[in-house]
Image (cartoon, rainbow, N blue to C red):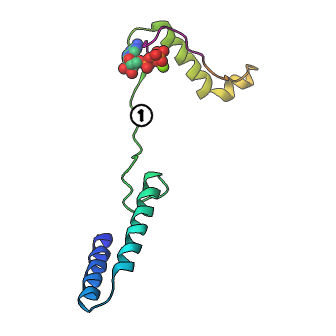
Amino acid sequence: MLKEISLGLGAALLVFALIAGYDVTPFIFLLLVGGVFLYMANARGMLKGFGNTSRPEKKQEISFDDIGGQGSAIKELKEALDFIRNHREIQSLGIRPLKGILMTGPPGTGKT
Ligand SMILES: Nc1ncnc2c1ncn2[C@@H]1O[C@H](COP(=O)(O)OP(=O)(O)OP(=O)(O)O)[C@@H](O)[C@H]1O
Ligand SMILES: [Mg+2]
């Protein structure tokens, strides 16, 4: 809302200056440079708000139920997840924390 108003006001001011006989080319140039800068900052996710619609934070909705087959792999992964979730209890039992998981298998079987 505020953005639209200021945009309209700016445009009106520019047209007025043009009619009044001013040279508006430097202003247009400045606006273009500013626009390009904003666009780039937006694309890099540097701006919060200010109409930043790129890269919305999407919720991860894939669960273990989406994995077909791989019964034993799923079980192992769930165990590993328990290790990460209850890392304090696990550590108090003297078990070293998980450093990583290595997945092996033929191409296209759901490792990634
Ligand atoms: N077990 C599975 N259950 C459900 N979907 C699967 C399964 N395996 C593969 N897919 C589907 O196939 C696509 C490719 O799988 P993925 O990228 O995980 O394979 P990958 O094992 O990482 O292969 P690569 O070894 O080539 O990297 C996934 O995006 C998914 O849609
Ligand atoms: Mg992969």
In the structure shown, which secondary structural element does the residue marked by tag 1 occupy?
loop
* Residue 16 placement, left or right of 110: left
- Whether label 1 lies within 8 Å of ligand 1 gets the answer no
* Residue 100 placement, left or right of 13: right
Which amino acid, mark 1?
Gln
* Number of marks drawn: 1
> What residue do we see at 30% from left, 74% from top?
7
* Nearest to the observer: residue 88 or residue 75: 75
Which image quadrant: the N terminus? Answer: bottom left
Residue 98 on the magenta span: no
Q: Magenta span: helix, strand or loop, mainly?
A: loop
Examine the image and state in which quarter residue 67 appears. Answer: top left
Return the residue at label 1.
60
* Nearest to the observer: residue 112 or residue 92: 112
The answer to whether residue 67 of the structure is visible from this angle is no
The answer to whether residue 88 of the structure is visible from this angle is yes
Examine the image and state in which quarter residue 29 appears. Answer: bottom left
Residue 59 percent across, percent down from the top left: 40, 38
Q: Residue furthest right?
A: 94
Is residue 99 placed above or below 11 in the rendered structure? above
Residue 87 percent across, percent down from the top left: 65, 27
> What residue do we see at 28% from left, 75% from top?
5
Query: Which residues are the magenta region?
Result: 102-110
> What residue do we see at 38% from left, 31% from top?
61
Residue 24 percent across, percent down from the top left: 33, 82
> What residue do we see at 64% from left, 22% from top?
100
Examine the image and state in which quarter residue 85 appears. Answer: top right
